[in-house]
Image (spheres, rainbow, N blue to C red):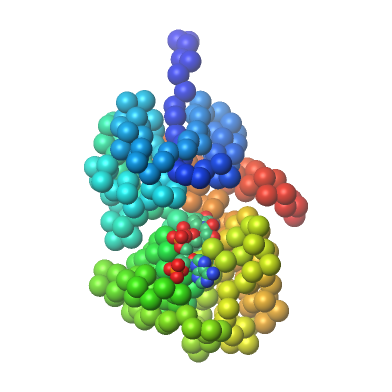
Amino acid sequence: MEKNYRAELVGVFGSPVEENPTGVMEEAAFEKMGLNYRYLTIRVEKGDLKTAMEAVRAFRMKGVNLTIPHKVEVLKYLDELSPAAEIIGAVNMVVNRDGKLWGENTDGKGFLLSLEQEGVSVKGKQVVILGAGGAARAIGVEAALAGAAKLIIVNRGRERGEELTRLIQERTPAQAEYLPWEGAIRIPSGTDILIQATCIGLYPHVEEKPEIAYDTVTAHMVVSDVVFNDPNTLFLQEAEKRGAKTINGLGMLVNQGARNFTLWTGAEAPVDVMTETLRREFGLDQS
Ligand code: NDP
């Protein structure tokens, strides 16, 4: 057999990226599947993104992930977008298809899959999202496209909250409403799914939880948190006390990584290995 010492390259561009755990998960998956791929965690500053995207083509990289601060800026350097990424207006992964760069956003799809894996569908549901940043945008748009009846966006900053609400109203079939986040807001009655999509509770700020009226969280709600590096957030603990079904952010992280893996390699992702690797990385038990 002919020798091939050349590895296929993928990776992540961002700043900071030092604590981004995706590479560990993807590398474990490549090894498990016997694929000669490398995932590089690369620090790219804001002004260097154009050059970095040119390098994707020059190095014939299979693709890259984008993280802070590049998810919106990168759109300028892409040839094509998935329909959902076009609506969301942000991309967290790129596939290099013979020199043509195609952008996708796998955050929202990964999140919806983590609900499905727990037997939860957004179809016809009233969904409340805390936050209107990148994660909330991806989840809000994908939930609306997947058939949620109504999205209620709760955000501290009015401008971002209203912008996401308008986006859902104008570009998806779902209804949307903005609820200003003033004091301990009450979760509107009729809510089926409540999603915490802000940075509150992100490690090391594990003692923080969003300010809401927790007595308005009820046992018939599904409550989810996107924070993954402490999967047992105070927010989820409070919801659990009220009898709600809770879903943490690890599934979202693994599922978006699994989608990226498949889009880059064409192979099915070894989800179990990816989950175990992350749990080990975050110092969680294997239960
Ligand atoms: P952004 O910076 O884009 O958005 C941050 C959001 O959090 C904004 O809505 C902001 O509100 C809100 N926020 C921040 N601090 C506070 C506060 N003290 N009180 C109220 N609201 C606050 O971040 P992302 O959307 O990219 O990330 C949000 C979270 O999602 C992070 O925890 C991140 O780790 C997680 N995430 C998880 C993923 C997973 O796979 N599980 C994937 C991607 C992200 P405002 O507009 O008012 O500033």
Near-viewer residue (53 or 231): 53
Above or below residue 272? Residue 218 is below
Q: Residue furthest top?
A: 2
Residue depicted at x 27% and y 32%: 99
Question: Horizontally, is 278 left or right of 157 in the view?
Answer: right
Question: Horizontally, is 222 left or right of 171 in the view?
Answer: right
Where residue 68 appears, as percent x and y from the top left, is 44, 50
Q: Quadrant of the C terminus?
A: bottom right
Where residue 119 appears, as percent x and y from the top left, is 55, 67
Residue depicted at x 32% and y 71%: 163
Where residue 202 appears, as percent x and y from the top left, is 60, 60
Question: Horizontally, is 60 left or right of 282 in the view?
Answer: left
Above or below residue 18? Residue 154 is below
Above or below residue 107? Residue 149 is below
> Does residue 123 appear anywhere in the picture?
no
Residue depicted at x 47% and y 44%: 15
Near-viewer residue (88 or 246): 88
